[in-house]
Structure formats: C-alpha cells, structure tokens
Amino acid sequence: NSHPSVLSIAGVTVNKERVGYSSQGPGHLDSQKPDLCAYTHFLGSGAYKNRLGKELADSGTSAACPVAAGVVASIRTKYPPSVLSPAELRQLLRRTAEDLGVAGFDYDHGFGLIDVPAILNALERIEIPELQIGEAVSGHLKQTGDSSLYRVRVGTSLSLELDGPDGVDFDLYVRKALQPTISEFDYRGYTSLPDEKISIRPSEPGEYFVMVRSFRGAGDFSLKASVESILNV
C-alpha cells in the first residue's frame, strides 16, 4: 500500500538482509515507499507448526507487518494521539530507524529497520521537561540522592542558577545529548551550598540535559536557565 497515510513495511531477515519477495518502491501514491522494514523469518511466535507439531519460522511481510504493528500498539498504550500525534509517531519511527543499505532512504528498506531501543530512548526525552529560557521552574527533592532531570536547547552560552533551601547541599550536573550521572557529565557545580550557578560556553550547540541532585537533605528548589542565543531546531 503506497498511500501516504499508511506505513508500508518491508521485510528483512534477522541478519538484516532484505527478503527477495519484499516489494520495493517507488510507490504509486507516495514515491517514498516502503516507509520502514521489520524482521521476518524468525522463530518464537508458535504461530506455525508442521503436522508433527514442530514450530516453523514466521515468514513473509505478513510476519514483518505484525512486528511493526506491535511496536506501534505498544507505544500507543502510553502515548495516545493527544500526546504523540500520528504524524509525530511516523516521524519518530523514521528518525530512530537503523539505516540499512545505502545511506538514508532507499527503495529496498525505506528509512531503515525499526529500532525499539532507539524509540524508547527518544520517548524518554519526550517525558523530560524542557527548560524555557528566562523562566524559573520549581521542583522538590524528597531525600538525599533524589534527583530531577531537565533538558534545554543551547546556542552559544548557558547559565544555570539553582536556588535551594537552607541547610541542604543540592548539586547541578550538565551533559550534552545524554542524561548526566554523578560520574558522567560535562559540567557540574562544586559548592556545598543549597545554591549553585554554572556558566558554560559549549563547544557545540544543541540539546543539553541538566540534573538537580541532592547530595544532602530534602526540600523545594527553583532552577532558571539563561542563554545569550538559542539554537532553533
């Protein structure tokens, strides 16, 4: 089906090789078909057995399509259209797909093989609140070791100001593109006070993740991000 509103799925083996009978593009209604590819020729579902009861491999795009449909259905159990629109979901699947064949889209594999770990990683980012430049956000750390995570898009500079309650030690950790930990970060504050400020000039613009973590104590905090210029992507 080459309708632009339908996901067309090609089939690849578990070795990521296109199966010969999988239809190729271009499509009649939408030239960029297939959209994606999914696995076929695999054991495990128990759907097919021979007369002796031995399991046979699922095969065909009739197996690849249910694999893709199952991924989409799983996403929809947590991210309804009101949160992730059909167009956004389609773009997510394409953007996170593992590129096969020639670089980029091709008529054998579409935008690539559906990549569930990459999808989950991208969905986690949706749930992380984004800091709006110049606007303070409020949060609460329940106990020592508790943390809150944010993301912010940065251009040429970034200033983060953390304001915590008296008698605690809250720390800031910043990392480009990945969530920071207490051992993996690009920048961090080094005070033993509830308030911290980090001023950085990143080597590359893009998305940064900010973690507020309690080294000692609990309480409310506010966090404010300021930058000189913002990267619009």
Image (tube, helix red, strand yellow):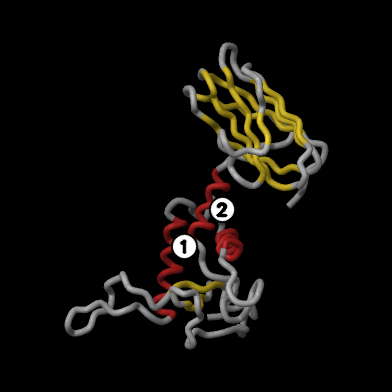
Q: Secondary structure at mark 2?
A: helix
Q: Residue furthest left?
A: 52
Which quadrant of the figure has residue 191? top right
Closer-to-camera residue (73/85): 73
Residue sitting at x 65%, y 36% = 174
Q: Residue at x 56, y 21 (%)?
A: 220
- Determine the residue located farthest toward the top in the rendered image: 167
In the rendered image, residue 112, in percent from the top left (x then y), is placed at: 57, 71
Q: Is residue 117 left or right of residue 136?
A: left
The kind of secondary structure element at disc 1 is: helix
Which picture quadrant has residue 28? bottom right
Q: Amino acid at mark 2?
A: Ala
User: Relative to 176, does residue 110 appear above or below in the rendering?
Assistant: below
In the picture, the disc for residue 122 is 2
Q: Which residue does the numbered mark 1 point to in the structure image?
A: 72
Q: Position of residue 59 (x, y in %)?
A: 38, 80
